[in-house]
Amino acid sequence: MSVILVLIFFSLLVAAGFLAAFLWAVRTGQYEDRYTPSVRILFDNDKETEK
C-alpha cells in the first residue's frame, strides 16, 4: 500500500513540474507567433544569384 502512495506522490510531482514548465513557456511568449509557422513553407528564402 505504501508503494502506491509513493507512486501517486511522484506522479503528482511530475505532473506539477510539467504544468509549471507549460505556464512558464506561456508567460515568456513561446506561443506568441501563431501565423508564421503555418505559412513559412510557402515562402522561398533562397536568393537566386544572377550570372
Image (spheres, rainbow, N blue to C red):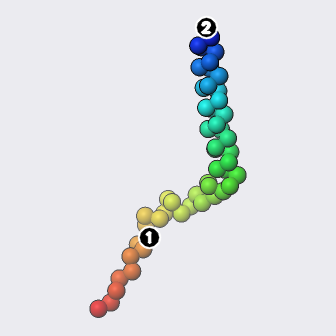
The one nearer the camera, 49 or 40, is 49
Per the image, label 1 sits on a secondary structure element best described as loop
Mark 1 highlights which residue? 43
Residue 32, percent from left and from top? 63, 58
> How many numbered discs?
2
What residue appears at the point 59 percent right and 13 percent down from the top-left corner? Answer: 3
Q: Please rate how many residues cluster around mark 1, counting C-alpha atoms within 10 Å: few if below 14, some from 14 to 19, many from 20.
A: few
Q: Which mark is residue 1?
A: 2
Inspect the image, locate mark 2, and give the three-letter code of the amino acid beneath it. Met
What residue appears at the point 65 percent right and 29 percent down from the top-left corner? Answer: 13
Q: Residue furthest left?
A: 51
The one nearer the camera, 12 or 2, is 2
Badge 1 or badge 2: first in the primary sequence: 2
Q: Residue furthest right?
A: 27
Q: Are marks 1 and 2 in contact (CB under 8 Å)?
A: no
From what the image shows, is residue 28 above or below residue 18? below
Inspect the image, locate mark 1, and give the three-letter code of the amino acid beneath it. Phe
Residue 38, percent from left and from top? 50, 59
Q: Residue furthest top?
A: 1
